[in-house]
Amino acid sequence: MRFIIIVLCGILIFSSCRNKSKQKNDTVSDNMFMAEVSRVYGFKCAICHGKEGVSVIKTAPNLTESQMTLEERIAIIKYGKTSMPPQKDVLDAKTIKGLALYIERFK
Ligand code: HEC
């Protein structure tokens, strides 16, 4: 009986360690993903919206002042509007969502 309890404890400790290391990997790859998104923003969006979200062309709104929800931002990045170019055939859905999240930090 004692042996079974010891084995069970061992399994518990082992699996909780495994979960921790998985979480760590997720944050590392999240950081890498956001670094990639930041790079994409730099060459795809900054020409109009500026590096820090302060617009450099007249017609592009300052992203620092955007009142849009996450869904609205995803939609405008996907489908574009007037001179804002659509990205749905250029970027994958994950990167588009990443961009919509990334521009939050300009506020
Ligand atoms: C050619 C210039 C140009 C580029 C490049 C560009 N945008 Fe825009 N963007 C605009 C213009 C112009 C608007 C305003 C569209 C309208 O409302 O008619 C806009 C609007 C937006 C809005 C809505 C802001 C608001 O609150 O009204 C978001 C979000 C946005 N752009 C994000 C991006 C992202 C992310 C990228 C890079 C993938 C990007 N834009 C690339 C010109 C551009």
Image (tube, helix red, strand yellow):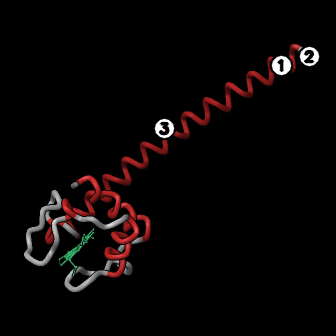
Residue 51 place in picture, x, y as percent: 15, 59
Hey, what amino acid is under mark 1? Ile
What is the number of the mark on residue 5?
1
Q: Is mark 2 within 8 Å of ligand 1?
A: no
- Do labels 1 and 2 touch, CB within 8 Å? yes
SS at badge 2: loop
Between 106 and 93, the residue placed more toward the observer is 106
Residue drawn at x 12%, y 67% is 55
For the residues marked 3 and 2, what is the alpha-carbon distance in whole angstroms? 35 Å
- Do labels 3 and 1 touch, CB within 8 Å? no
Hey, what amino acid is under mark 3? Lys
Residue drawn at x 40%, y 69% is 71
Between 49 and 90, the residue placed more toward the observer is 49
Residue with the mark numbered 2: 1
Q: Quadrant of residue 14?
A: top right
SS at badge 1: helix
For ligand 1, the image quadrant comes to bottom left
SS at badge 3: helix
**Which mark is first along the chain, 2 or 3?**
2
Hey, what amino acid is under mark 2? Met
Q: Is mark 1 within 8 Å of ligand 1?
A: no
Residue with the mark numbered 3: 24
Q: Quadrant of residue 2?
A: top right
Q: Quadrant of the N terminus?
A: top right
Between 58 and 50, the residue placed more toward the observer is 58
Name the residue at the right extreme: 1
Residue 70 place in picture, x, y as percent: 38, 64
Total marks shown come to 3
- Do labels 3 and 2 touch, CB within 8 Å? no
Residue 62 place in picture, x, y as percent: 16, 66
Residue 73 drawn above or below residue 4: below
The answer to whether residue 89 is left or right of residue 4 is left
